[in-house]
Image: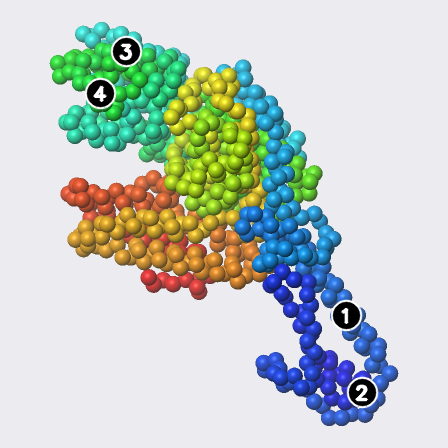
């Protein structure tokens, strides 16, 4: 000890010598400050005497003084060398907070530094990739030629139907490609599912007049999960089949009981149209591609499915693993009415036979002689015969993984549908081509350029996507106990190029900030100048499209509570006409100007998001954005405050819960700002709090089996904030239709789900507050 040393060196009492290695936060992290406590120094350490005096002793052992001093100095020098080396290595992995990259141009500059121009000593060690360098490397390696080669593998193929030979053959090819890219892990995931497919003969539609049947059409296409058998009813046209369209007919006192409704494709999914028809009392439904929305499709009949949900509808909430026993239950989303798609030619012929009222002006599409219904005296009916069959199929999901070096058990998933009814070039081919190219490029960056991602990246090729994201949903159901705690983002590549004029974006609010910064760093492939962000503008968030049931990202978000992003190009004024038909070919998609450049740009967006999420210390998820989303809903709810109070209820508790969530996000931001981000344990704990935000908006008061899409923002059901808002609106328009007990339950579920999310965001249980 220092007092022993003082006696050996002179026998006279001396003060302690204190060494302080001071950690600087101004960018100069290699500075070491040594304070010597002199006898006249003012103030000592708390709880310790300033001087340690001992009685004088004989000056013996003076000859030991210099060896002891030398030993102490050697130890101190060794400590300094080790400390500085450790600090240098840790800070080379710093992140850029503002996205510009300037703060990462100095190898040992701390990401906490205020001065971007700090010059530091270069410390030897493994190569460190700063974000601007990594972003450029990805852009340079992505190849439009490779994307074209991948896409052309779907040429001269008639179908990739799920579980059939072409689908399985392509799955094996993707597995081999993942292996050739030297991914760390490559594996298959098998599921045994029930699918409804076309029977031995085509379904048929007849016009019946005077007991004579005239065949209207017998198409090759069919609608999966339709009710089998024959139904007969009077035809009624309901525009796009939206709820608002059905309500217009009800206001006109048009009865839909026992009818066969006709609607055109677009606006919402076929399954949602069918559900609206069933609710209105129809016994059958026909859908066609209207030439106003879909050019050059007169004879085309699209394939579709009518399940209002995702996954295998005969094992709802359960994974479809082989020979697993399940309760004899079916999804409540099955239509239980007959459904078939027809051509616009057949629809036009049917309209010509109808002698009732003309279509409403806003309902007229591209067909002549549009009629809503028959006259009161007409005896004409439509007969629909469906003879689909149920089959058991084995499907394969193919996975490849690049393991993270710091947190391999945390991963971002990039996925694309592989199967298709028909060639499926736009629907499945584009996404699969992008998936293979991203796996090749990112693996090359890791294996050959030395990038070490902190977290893992999983590449997934899904089967049975055409039947309602079956492959993706079964995977989520099979591993639901762990995925929500490990997968922190899903990037969907499906149908990424359906046009070139506009961009279609669907995403969790957690990813808005990252997506915006990513678009600023990707060139616009159409204009050859400026970025994608320049195209969408600063108000792009207002154009975000809510995820639909036909998007494979939907179950990730609404069922598993995993943040998602789905990004692509389209033409808003003209739909891609061939999606889900036998004409979804390379030739028809190539009509799109700069097809492969657009694919490359979409792949660059997906690749940047994946790499950024595995590069930075802190997960790039904007957890504060949900506070803004809650505030938007609060403003909408507030106008109904008096109506709610008239029922003896209050909205105050809901508003207080929103305030608690806002305070929780503020607290987490402070914890991040005040933490040592180079401490891996602290950093992991903070990132865990960030990645759970999405999951905590799944209502914990509902059964995943009965209400699988439990997300209060993006789910389906009465527990959602949108459903609560619609019920509040009824207090003004149809007060008698509001069940007060249901409204009370909605308020309670929303309030406590938000309160629970706030408590989870705070972190430790002793930091939570059970009071509002």
Q: Is residue 8 visible?
A: yes
Say which of marks 2 and 4 sits in front: 4
Residue under label 2? 10
Up-down relation of residue 421 to residue 116 (above or below): above
Q: Tell which circle, 1 or 3, labels the residue nearer the N-terminal end.
A: 1
How far apart, in angstroms, are the residues tagged by discs 2 and 3?
Answer: 115 Å
Q: Name the residue: 66% across, 52% down.
A: 106
Q: Residue 178, image x and y in percent?
A: 62, 32
Residue under label 4? 359
Say which of marks 3 and 4 sits in front: 4
Question: Residue 217 appears in which quarter of the rendering?
Answer: top left
Whether tag 4 and tag 1 are in contact, CB under 8 A, the answer is: no
Q: How is the image coloured?
A: rainbow
Question: SS at mark 1?
Answer: helix
Which residue is more in the foreground, 651 or 639? 639
Which residue is more in the foreground, 354 or 648? 354
What label does residue 75 carry, if any? 1
Label 1: how many Cα within 10 Å (few below 14, some 14–19, many 20+): few
- In this image, 129 relative to 314: left or right? right
Question: Residue 81 appears in which quarter of the rendering?
Answer: bottom right
Q: Tell which circle, 1 or 2, labels the residue nearer the N-terminal end.
A: 2
Instruction: Looking at this view, name the residue that lies furthest to the right.
Output: 63
How far apart, in angstroms, are the residues tagged by discs 1 and 2?
Answer: 22 Å
């Amino acid at each position: 000890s220092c007092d022993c040393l003082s006696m050996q060196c002179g026998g006279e009492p001396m003060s302690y010598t204190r060494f302080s290695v001071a950690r600087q936060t101004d960018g100069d992290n290699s500075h070491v400050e040594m304070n010597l406590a002199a006898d006249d120094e003012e103030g000592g350490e708390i709880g310790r005497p300033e001087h340690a005096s001992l009685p004088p002793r004989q000056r013996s052992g003076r000859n030991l003084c210099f060896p002891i001093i030398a030993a102490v100095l050697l130890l101190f020098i060794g400590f300094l060398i080790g400390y500085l080396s450790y600090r240098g290595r840790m800070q080379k992995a710093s992140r850029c907070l503002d996205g510009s990259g300037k703060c990462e141009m100095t190898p040992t500059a701390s990401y906490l530094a205020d001065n971007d121009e700090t010059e530091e000593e270069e410390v030897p060690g493994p190569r460190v990739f700063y974000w601007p360098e990594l972003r450029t490397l990805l852009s340079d390696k992505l190849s439009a030629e490779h994307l074209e080669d991948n896409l052309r593998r779907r040429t001269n193929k008639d179908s990739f139907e799920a579980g059939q030979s072409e689908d399985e053959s392509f799955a094996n090819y993707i597995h081999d490609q993942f292996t050739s890219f030297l991914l760390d892990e490559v594996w298959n995931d098998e599921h045994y599912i029930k699918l409804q497919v076309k029977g031995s003969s085509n379904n048929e539609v007849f016009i019946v007049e005077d007991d004579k049947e005239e065949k209207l059409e017998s198409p090759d296409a069919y609608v999966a999960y339709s009710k089998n058998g024959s139904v007969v009813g009077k035809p009624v046209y309901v525009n796009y089949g939206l709820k608002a369209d059905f309500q217009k007919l009800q206001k006109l006192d048009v009865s839909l009981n026992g009818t066969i409704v006709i609607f055109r494709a677009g606006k919402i999914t076929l399954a949602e149209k069918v559900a609206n028809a069933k609710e209105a009392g129809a016994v059958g439904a026909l859908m066609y591609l209207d030439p106003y929305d879909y050019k050059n499709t007169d004879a085309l009949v699209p394939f579709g499915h009518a399940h209002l949900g995702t996954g295998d509808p005969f094992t709802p909430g359960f994974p479809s693993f082989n020979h697993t026993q399940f309760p004899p239950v079916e999804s409540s989303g099955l239509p239980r009415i007959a459904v078939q798609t027809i051509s616009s030619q057949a629809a036009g012929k049917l309209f010509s036979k109808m002698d009732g009222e003309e279509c409403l002006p806003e309902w007229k599409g591209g067909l002549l002689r549009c009629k809503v219904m028959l006259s009161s005296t007409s005896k004409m009916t439509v007969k629909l015969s469906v003879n689909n069959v149920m089959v058991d199929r084995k499907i394969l999901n193919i996975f490849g993984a690049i393991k993270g070096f710091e947190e391999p058990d945390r991963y971002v998933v990039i996925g694309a549908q592989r199967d298709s009814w028909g060639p499926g070039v736009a629907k499945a081919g584009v996404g699969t081509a992008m998936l293979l190219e991203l796996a090749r490029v990112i693996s090359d960056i890791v294996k050959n350029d030395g990038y070490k991602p902190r977290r893992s990246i999983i590449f997934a090729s899904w089967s049975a996507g055409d039947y309602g994201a079956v492959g993706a949903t079964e995977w989520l159901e099979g591993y639901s106990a762990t995925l929500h705690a490990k997968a922190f983002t899903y990037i969907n590549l499906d149908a990424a190029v359906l046009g070139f004029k506009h961009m279609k974006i669907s995403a969790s609010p957690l990813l808005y900030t990252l997506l915006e910064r990513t678009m600023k760093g990707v060139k616009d492939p159409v204009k050859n100048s400026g970025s994608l962000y320049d195209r969408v503008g600063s108000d792009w968030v207002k154009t975000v499209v809510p995820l639909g049931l036909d998007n494979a990202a939907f179950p990730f978000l609404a069922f598993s509570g995993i943040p998602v992003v789905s990004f692509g190009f389209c033409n808003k004024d003209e739909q891609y006409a061939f999606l889900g038909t036998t004409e979804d070919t390379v030739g028809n998609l190539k009509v799109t100007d700069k097809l492969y450049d657009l694919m490359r740009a979409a792949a660059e967006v997906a690749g940047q998001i994946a790499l950024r999420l595995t590069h930075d210390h802190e997960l790039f998820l904007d957890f504060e954005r949900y506070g803004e989303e809650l505030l938007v809903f609060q403003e909408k709810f507030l106008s109904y405050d008096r109506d709610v109070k008239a029922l003896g209820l209050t909205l105050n508790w809901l508003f207080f819960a929103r305030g608690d969530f806002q305070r929780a996000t503020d607290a987490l931001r402070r914890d991040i700002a005040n933490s040592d981000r180079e401490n891996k344990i602290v950093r992991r704990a903070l990132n865990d709090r960030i990645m759970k935000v999405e999951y905590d908006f799944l209502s914990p008061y509902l059964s995943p089996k009965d209400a699988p899409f439990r997300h209060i923002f993006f789910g389906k059901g009465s527990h959602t904030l949108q459903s609560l808002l619609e019920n509040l609106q009824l207090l003004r328009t149809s007060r008698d239709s509001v069940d007060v007990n249901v409204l009370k339950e909605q308020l309670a579920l929303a309030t406590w789900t938000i309160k629970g999310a706030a408590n989870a965001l705070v972190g430790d249980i002793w930091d939570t507050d059970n009071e509002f």
